[in-house]
Amino acid sequence: MRVERITRYPVKGLSPEQMEQVELSPGAGIPLDRRFAFAQGDSPFDPADPKWLPKRNFACLAVNAKAAAIHSAYEARTNTLSLRAEGHAPLLADLSDAAGRAAAAAWITTFLGEDARGALRLSEVPGHAFTDIPDKAVSLIGLASVAELGARAGMELDPLRFRANILFSGATPFAELDWMGREVLLGGARLKVFRRTKRCAATEVNPATAERDAKPPRWLMEHYGHADLGIYATVLEGGRVAVGDALELP
């Protein structure tokens, strides 16, 4: 099996960042993955007492399909976030100061319009990741699984719908779901699979058009009797992982 794509999402619900390589550390996810999130106005998230909350508390594709139309890019060196979308003036926000963070939150709130639940606020807490599960992990999906689901549903599915960190080739469809409790060698790192990824309404959103034009959770239930596609693994031993590296079951 082979690593085909490495992806992180600096801001929960917004654009992916493709990576040629990444250095994994024990007990951590992809560096900078879901570092930021835009908390909904009614979200109880408290940066002073950060606790994991379900995705609906933040701007995300499961509840805000329109967010897929935002083109975002985070520059870690300068700690700046650029936001642009058709019909809206672009924004380059310095996240190092309160004014820049407020400007980014106001831009997102305005863009989402009626989809926003009150005034959103940009959230970041050192060491906290706004992931879909409480555990710090790396998410993986076999490309064959995505292709087979699309074939059964009669629609080609862009793997980006599933917003995984690692896309890999060379496995039979849905083989990864049988790896629970097993260790995998991923490039120079060693991980342990501990959870299957249950799919939600976020996968209905076309990442190119921001339209809900597919029903992966329903199709998974219809064809396989479950809503799972992909897996989560915790990093046991850190190391470098690059596109083209092997993924092996020792």
Image (spheres, rainbow, N blue to C red):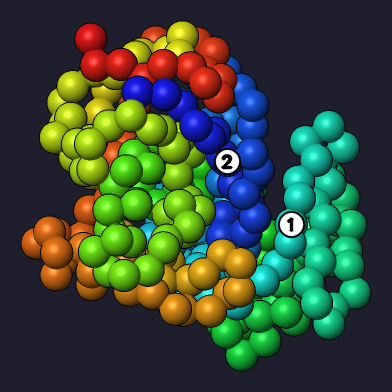
Kind of residue at badge 1: Ser
Left of 208 or right of it: where is 108? right
Pick the front one: 206 or 65: 206
Occupied quadrant, residue 236: top left
- Quadrant in which residue 189 is drawn: top left
Give the vertical position of 200 relative to 245 (above or below): below
Q: Position of residue 50 (x, y in %)?
A: 49, 48
Q: Position of residue 7 (x, y in %)?
A: 56, 39
Q: Amino acid at mark 2?
A: Arg
- Whether 238 is drawn above or below 153: the answer is above
Q: Give the mark nearest the N terminus, 2 or 1.
A: 2
- Viewer-nearest residue: 36 or 195: 195
Quarter occupied by the C terminus: top left
Q: What residue would you read off at disc 2?
A: 8
Whole-percent x, y for residue 6 in the image: 54, 33
Foreground residue, 100 or 229? 229
Q: Is residue 208 above or below residue 113?
A: above
Quadrant containing the N terminus is: top left
**Would residue 41 be seen by someone viewing this image from the given angle?**
no
Q: Residue at x 67, y 71 (%)?
A: 69
Residue 167's disc is none
Secondary element at tag 1 = strand
Q: Residues within 10 Å of mark 1 (few under 14, many from 20)?
A: many
| SS type, badge 2 | strand
Identify residue for label 1.
Answer: 72
